[in-house]
Image (cartoon, rainbow, N blue to C red):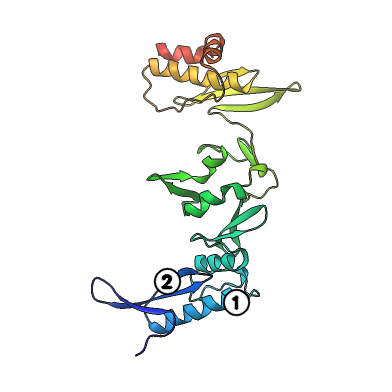
Amino acid sequence: MPQLPGVYQAKKKNGTIYYRSSLTYRAKHISLGSYDTMEAAHNAYLLANRILQDKNLEINNYRADSVLLFEKWVCLINFRDNGLYFSNPIYIRPAFFYYFFSPSHFFIFDRDDLFYYSNHKISCRGGHYFVADYGMQINIMSRYGIKNYAVQGKDYRFINGNTNDYRYENIEILNAYHGVSSFCQNGSLLYRTKIHVKGNYTVGVYQTEEEAAIAYNKAIDFLKKAGVKKAYTPNYMEGMSPAAYADLYTSIQISPKIEHYLSE
């Protein structure tokens, strides 16, 4: 049987025949996928050509029984409309871009993140979204200053209420440091530091966020001296000189309960 347009026969290691589909558009060779039959591969080729030529076909026209994977559908439409081909399911807008998981499920990112997400595929496991980077699984929220333990509404919030909108202007970090939370008292904003050791200990209440963060670090040091083996993550004080850090560390008082832990 002669090969149909856009179809190439291939063979698996076990000798099984399968068919690969591809096309060339704007001098770009695009692989469309692998199929069990020549007809399916050819239908993928025909559909891809139709998508590239018909601007009435949009992302929300995708159906689950499509011969093309959803990711490929998005890639083709973005290439058609914006002239850029990405292997990840990205669709570009003037000031931001969408990263699609389904026609109704997508994240919004700033254009500044386009290079990163065009080269890092987002995966999901247990409701957590991550990318593989240098052999590690990196939670995408960490890219925006949101720590793994952070609680939405307490440690951070999405300003417009859309939890899928990761544009920088939409993310507000309420508590930037481990163990620190803010609260109002008599009209003043204060910062409470807590640390978990067989329950939550209040380390102290402080005037500034930086003092509260350093108090957490000081509590870690006390607990390590007491033989506590838990792997606490200290707060990194970006932009603070070693001398300024040392002065605050020395002057900051922590709860006697933490110091008492040394003698328990």
From the viewer's perspective, is 180 left or right of 264?
A: right
Place residue 209 in its image quadrant.
top right
Pointer 1 residue: 53
Residue 123 visible from this viewpoint: no
Q: Looking at this rendering, what residue extends furthest in the left direction?
A: 14
Residue extending farthest to the front is 27
Under mark 1, the amino acid is Gln
Mark 2: amino acid: Gly
Image coordinates for residue 3, horizontal then vertical, percent: 38, 85
As displayed, is residue 233 above or below residue 119? above
| CA gap, disc 2 and disc 1 | 19 Å
| Marker disc for residue 33 | 2
Q: Secondary structure at mark 1?
A: helix
Q: Secondary structure at mark 2?
A: strand
Q: Tell me where residue 171 appears, x and y as whole percent.
A: 64, 41
Spot the residue most to the right.
187
Residue positioned 57% across, 74% down in the render: 52
Asked if 16 appears above or below 193 in the picture, the reply is: below
* Residue 253 horizontal side relative to residue 3, left or right: right
Q: Nearer the viewer, residue 27 or 165?
A: 27
Please report the residue visible at 47 percent of the width from the left and 25 percent of the height from the top: 234
Sort mark 2 into few (<14), some (14-19) or many (20+) by Cα contacts within 10 Å: some
Quadrant of the snapshot with the N terminus: bottom left
* 73 horizontally vs 170: left or right: left
